[in-house]
Image (tube, rainbow, N blue to C red):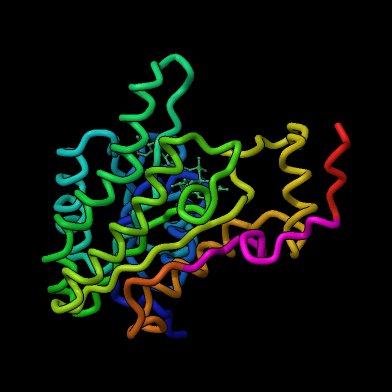
Amino acid sequence: MQGKLDTRKALISGGASGIGEATARLFASEGAAVLIADIDDAGGERVVREIREAGGVAHYRRVDVTDRSAVRRMVHDAADTLGGLGILFNNAMTNPSADYSEDERWNLMLESGLSAYWAAATEAAPILARSGHGAIVSNASIAGARLGIEFASEAYSAAKAGVLGLSRKLAKRFGPEGVRSNAICPGIIETPRWRSPGQAEPQFARRWRQMAPLGRFGKTDEVARLVLFFASDDASYITGQDIAIDGGFTTAMRFESVDFLAD
Ligand code: NAD
């Protein structure tokens, strides 16, 4: 059977878990050779092993996206390893612990969640252009990019809003070379970021589900399918766009379902 990404080569940052992992698996099942860049060696190697066991082509590299020169090296390493590069999924973003000062947290989040996306995209663009079907997909969020949200920090919100501006400017700059650039804005998606298996659901999460028209969180494979859409020829005339994938939360919030006075 033909895959939507047969012969394509894809670099996915943060592919050892969550949305990046689901995207790596889906891309590989659609025929792409993928390189996962992450700092979680055990997770990255597990995903690669499972993709290979399923007959796909995958590689793992340890790359810390808070290190800009490592991000630039990652692009060339991916192209050398895969024999070219047609797709870049900018997805990793660090979530620094409270051990860091507020300034350090700001810098790490802006570096990993915005500057690294810019460095990877601008470094990759000439290589993506040579593929003849270059596509950049950048992971923003409804937080910051669409809404100010209590549980998203200013740094997270600023980085995610910046991703939209960056993605549109990349579309403008590299469109003439045939490289498209689009962004996704997930709502709450079931990943380890929100809840480890067996843990109780936090209260804000329950409220969120009540307020979203579709009444549930998103699944990582649902987000992966949107990334696949933007990365594949299905979106061959789409660039500079972003789509929220949030169960309708930002456009059709259900206020009537929430008791605002409850604890
Ligand atoms: P996740 O924690 O499951 O995966 C994130 C991956 O990034 C992990 O494998 C982690 O090891 C890796 N990573 C973290 N810091 C890194 C670093 N410095 N260098 C390299 N890799 C690093 O989280 P996720 O929810 O899949 O998040 C992926 C992206 O989706 C992020 O950009 C996040 O902001 C965005 N997002 C997630 C949600 C959600 O609800 N899960 C909503 C909106 C946007």
The residue at 30%/68% (across/down) is 181
Q: Is residue 231 left or right of residue 71?
A: right
Give the camera-side residue of 50 and 148.
Answer: 148
Examine the image and state in which quarter residue 262 appears.
top right
- Taking the spot 31% from the left edge, 30% from the top edge, the residue there is 107
Quarter where residue 174 is shown? bottom left
In depth, the one of 66 and 232 nearer the eye is: 66
Check the image and report above or below for 72 versus 153: below
Instruction: Please tell me which residue is depicted at 31% across the width and 58% down the height of the picture.
Output: 165
Counting from the top left corner in percent of width and height, residue 129 is at 15, 72
Range drawn in magenta: 243-256
| Magenta stretch: dominant secondary structure | loop
**Quadrant holding the C terminus:** top right
Residue 244 belongs to the span the image colors magenta: yes
Frontmost residue, 83 versus 121: 121
Q: Is residue 90 magenta?
A: no
- Between 41 and 13, the one nearer to me in the picture: 13
Q: Is residue 58 visible?
A: no
238 vs 253, left or right, is left
Q: Is residue 209 above or below residue 103?
A: below
